[in-house]
Amino acid sequence: MAPTLEKVFDLRAFLGKTDTLPLGHVKGGAQRIIVPVTSGFLKGSGVEAEIIPTTGADWLLLDPATGTAHLDVRIALRTKDGDSIYIYYPGIIKLDEKIGMALSWDPAMRTTKSSDHYFFTTPRIEVSNEKHKWMEQTVFVSHGHFFAEGDGTQAVEYEVYKLVSG
């Protein structure tokens, strides 16, 4: 029987426009852009944590030949109890008009829905507290979308699911 998905977290990561570093064309035409993660949160399954400022970024690779963006995100979080969480999440986004607006920081950008995009990651989590060690022994997948407040603030938001044996 095929595995099923069970929602376990919401993750929101705010992006830093002013410190974004476009590295230009690399690897035969793809564009590397380093986008800092400035703040955010993880909530669900008995865990509430805040992203520690300056500890995260996405080493994004835009590939116009395939119409995809390849995510390479790393963030560090701290729970209300002071426990540490590290999340690495690679992923793929199929580029579309709304994704283009978000990546170009278009002021007309507004919050999208996960169903608007092919936007998936596979988070891998490391934790310091024994009560959260189940996260290190679980396969996760997340479905993402963009969150925009209309004031220039922009974030990516993920619904994070764990795979459950069928």
Image (cartoon, rainbow, N blue to C red):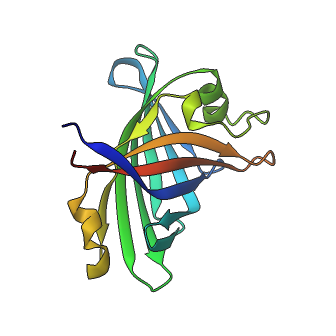
Q: Is residue 69 above or below residue 91?
A: above
In this view, the residue in front, 6 or 137, is 6
Q: Quadrant of the C terminus?
A: top left
**Residue placed furthest toward the bottom:** 81
In this view, the residue in front, 164 or 43, is 164
Question: In the image, what residue occupies the spot 43% across and 60% down?
Answer: 75
The answer to whether residue 60 shows anywhere in this view is yes
Q: How many labels does the image show?
A: 0
Question: In the image, what residue occupies the spot 70% across and 40% down?
Answer: 111
The answer to whether residue 129 shows anywhere in this view is no
Q: In this view, does 26 lie above or below 149?
A: above
| Quadrant hosting residue 110 | top right
Q: Is residue 107 left or right of residue 13?
A: right
**Where residue 46 sits: x, y (%)?**
44, 73
**Where residue 71 sits: x, y (%)?**
41, 39
Q: In which quarter of the image is the N terminus?
A: top left
**Where residue 39 sits: x, y (%)?**
58, 63
Question: In the image, what residue occupies the spot 39% across and 81% down?
Answer: 83
In this view, the residue in front, 65 or 46, is 46
**Residue placed furthest toward the top:** 65
